[in-house]
Amino acid sequence: MTEFERLHQTRDEAPGAGTLFAAICDMNGILRGKRLPLAKLTKTQAEGIRMPLSSIGVDIWGVDVAGTRLTLEQGDQDGLCLPTGRAPVDLGWTGQGASLLPMWMRKEDGTPYFADARYLLADVLSRYQAKGLRPVVATELEFFLLDPGEGSATPARGKTGNPPREFDNIYSLEELSEASGFLDEVCAMAAAAGIEVEAATSEGAPRQFEFNLLHRPDALKIADDTLFFKQIIKNAARRHGALASFMAKPYEAHAGSGLHVHFSVIDEAGRNIFDDGTDRGSDLMLSAVAGLLDCMGELTLSCAPHLNSYRRLCPGGLAPTAIAWGYENRTSALRIPAGPHQARRVEHRVAGADANPYVVLATILGSALYGIEEKLTPPQPVVSNAHALGLQSLAMDWRQGLEWFAASPRVGRVLHPEFAAAFAACKQQEQDGFASRMTDFELLTYRLSV
């Protein structure tokens, strides 16, 4: 018996103790896999598990995507899911004693299946490695605590005397104090899973919070950590009588939740290539910015993959709408934070909390590398409200986002073509699913008026 098995068995003697979830991450950022006895750990680590290739690309409802032509057309062939090399992590599934064994999917011949977004990101990182470069990345993850007793999005209840759940309460210590038991549990579980948390804040909508993960020169681990951290937050919230939601914008009248990404790039000597000793940043940083701007419109879908994502990307707030950059300007899609020049970096502010972190990082880092390789030059930085300057915009809605993504020849350069084709098919099926459903509002509007 391994040390992990001994610790795991003594940690939880509830029914179901001593089990594993062996899982991949699908294109929507949802964990899918199998439940196995803990006794199968060593065998599973050595041999992996089999799941259909189609399972990595199912739609948001878990339905096979016809457009990938992987099911009936090819007999729904299996892929081989192998461990990523990370030890099992306890993400807090209550009463089951189950930990996650992270996996990623290969084809039967052993080659990577790039519809697996983890391989997509690894492919982008290999292109950096070939140039002797390594991205340094951190994520900032926002979410809401909702009342589980309500059918619609309603802020979680607080104790008597604590801040009302109807009010925005940005940076409120009272909100943080009210949620301290939940926040403490999240941080403790994250630390046990090897996830380094820098800070937690109360954000600008009712019962909205943000966690910041530490910068690390390992973008693949940061993407893993962000995915696992979301599950830790969800599981901890349930134990504290709330539902954690990463929906981009559950409330019309309040801010949405983003997945902001900070990144720089170091060379083989560990030097930050974005630093030129000034507040301006190096020419390589400016080329990275230019690449991000050039690709941003047609890759909006990567960062805003769902219908609700585009309710967050609207004028009047701090979520971006214009394809713009600026120094210390939170209305722009790209912000160059102030601070010591040695830490010169780019903050990418487009992605919602509902996006797949592997896809987001692959898109950002791939676009930046495109700009560096092409030696692109950005326009002048924005120094005022980017929403009001008439600049080129991100995709205005979900349908336009998919149209731009599917039509762009540049998408296949930034992201592996195998992923791009599968992702477009997945999003088309999701759009078709929503288009086929009649809403109560549609019925109310037209039932008697026409």
Image: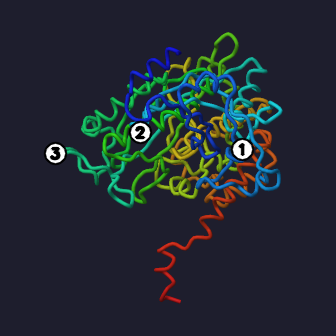
Do the CB atoms of the residues marked 3 and 2 lie less than 8 Å apart? no
310 up-or-down from 26: above or below: below
Determine whether the residue tagged by mark 1 lies in a helix, strand or loop.
Answer: strand
Dot 2: element: helix
Ranked by sequence position, the earlier of labels 1 and 3 is 1
State the residue lying farthest toward the top.
269
Residue 289 visible in the current orientation: no
Whole-number angstrom distance, CA of label 3 to CA of label 2: 26 Å
Viewer-proximal residue, 254 or 154? 154
Residue at image position (45%, 23%) is: 8
Q: Nearer the viewer, mark 1 or mark 3?
A: 1
Which percent across, then down, holds residue 151?
38, 61
Rendering coords of residue 354 (x, y %): 53, 47
Query: Horizontal and vertical percent for residue 340?
Result: 51, 19
Give the vertical position of 318 relative to 2 (above or below). below
Q: Nearer the viewer, residue 352 or 220?
A: 220
Q: Residues within 10 Å of mark 1 (few under 14, many from 20)?
A: some
- Where is mark 1, residue-wise? 52
User: Tag 2: residue type?
Assistant: Asn
* Amino acid tagged 1: Pro
Q: Quadrant of residue 122?
A: top right
Query: Which of the two labelled residues, at mark 3 and mark 2, occupies the earlier sequence position?
Result: 3
Q: Which mark is residue 235?
A: 2
Which residue lies at the image location 69% right of the left edge and 59% below the top edge? Answer: 428
Query: Would you name the residue on which mark 3 appears?
Result: 161
Foreground mark, 3 or 2, reads: 2
The amino acid marked with disc number 3 is Gly
Q: Nearer the viewer, residue 195 or 379?
A: 195
Is there CB contact under 8 Å for labels 1 and 3?
Answer: no
The spot of residue 328 in percent (x, y) is 50, 35
Q: Earlier in the sequence, mark 1 or mark 2?
A: 1
